[in-house]
Image (spheres, rainbow, N blue to C red):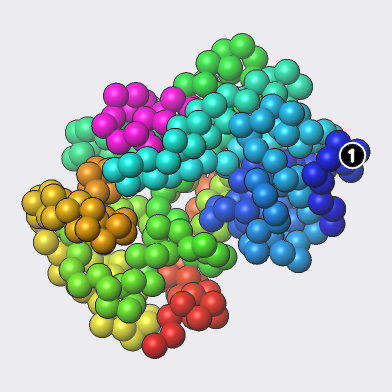
Amino acid sequence: MSHSRGRVSLRPVSALVTGGGGRLGNVLVRALLERGQQVRVLEPGRRPESLEGLDIDFVSGSVLETDDVARALEGVNVVYHLAAKIDLRPKKDPLMVAINVDGTRNVVDACLARGLRLVHTSSHHALEREPLDQPLTEDKPLALHEKCEYHRSKAVGETIVLDACERGLDAVIVNPGSMIGPHDYEPSMVGVALIDMYHGRIPVLLDMLSDYVDVRDVAEGMIAAAEKGRRGERYFLTGDVIPVTEMATVYGELTGAKVPTRALPLWVGWVLLPFSLAASAITKKDPFITADMLRASVSNEVVSHEKAARELGYCIRPLREALGDAVAWYQERGCLNA
């Protein structure tokens, strides 16, 4: 394995993964290594725990720096662009839009100049969801006027990719759902919710739907997109939409924990919102509910991954298996200890 900070020659690799130390990134890196591919990761700072022991090239750098991007692309065939930031708090980290928009532009421009294949990671929240009683599919318009700034930033990122495709960029876009499963090191927002639910810190649920999908299935879908995806096309790498109460019931059965299995209407969350923000101002802690959290909780009854299944061979494992492996992972990490 190697680690690069300066301007040194890097060995040729099959793939570059930006944000390869993150929730999805480290799982994608593992899947690529299992296929015998040589992998490079571009990630700020030191090599994260999620990549320890993996035989990769590690480039310490940022997608916001064009020199870092250029250095990371040396000898690469395929680029998986995952570097992104999600922030649903009222006071946003200014780096979120910078990374999601400017960082994407830097990667896109560099790939276009070098004629590289790009797999860009977006979100199905980048698309307009109304009307909710109709399936959400890849042909919906981008949510460029969405109130949630994170959703808008992902939509703008897609426009950058698609505009470059018109100029010859060889790129595909993938839109993952709500990911669960192992190798959740930080942990993710979904992981934090599962851990908090186990410890009784989530006394009640809100009535909402979500398309939970195993992170390993998303990683496999991304590799298939690189190999089979049509240039300029978008592919949903999502799961089956279910009520959050159904997920909680299965989670309780797997862990033996007493978890909430009934849900309050989503409008109750909007009623609680001002109290959440007031408590946050007093305690100086992040609010337990924000407007963007509530906006992100709205889902179509169907989020279709039929196109990915048909064109990429994408398939998903059962919820119980994905949750079971997630539980085993959190237990091994000591997150579910009494």
Counting other residues with Cα less than 10 Å from the Cα at mark 1, is it few (<14), some (14-19), or many (20 or more)?
A: few
Q: Relative to the observer, which residue lies in front, 277 or 327?
A: 277
Residue 25, given in percent of the width and then of the height, sits at 60, 51
**What's under tag 1, amino acid-wise?**
Val
Q: Among all residues in the image, which is located at the extreme top?
A: 167
248 above or below 300? below
Q: What stretch is highlighted in magenta?
A: 141-158
Side of 332 relative to 242 (left or right):
right
Q: Residue at position x 65%, y 46% from top?
A: 44
The answer, for residue 162, to whether it is visible in the render is yes
Which quadrant holds residue 105?
top right
Q: Is mark 1 on a helix, strand or loop?
A: loop
Residue 146 lies within the magenta run? yes
Q: Residue at position x 8%, y 51% from top?
A: 271
Side of 311 relative to 32 (left or right):
left
The answer, for residue 175, to whether it is visible in the render is no
Which quadrant holds residue 311?
top right
Residue 158, given in percent of the width and then of the height, sits at 48, 27
Residue 114, given in percent of the width and then of the height, sits at 76, 22
Q: Residue at position x 29%, y 24% from top?
A: 145
Total number of numbered discs in the rendering: 1
Residue 209 lies within the magenta run? no
16 above or below 253? above
Side of 250 relative to 282 (left or right):
right
14 above or below 68? below
Which quadrant holds residue 143?
top left
Side of 72 relative to 331 (left or right):
right
Residue holding disc 1: 8
Q: Dividing the image into 4 quarters, which one contains the C terminus?
A: bottom left
Q: Residue at position x 38%, y 72% from top?
A: 195
Q: Dividing the image into 4 quarters, which one contains the N terminus?
A: bottom right
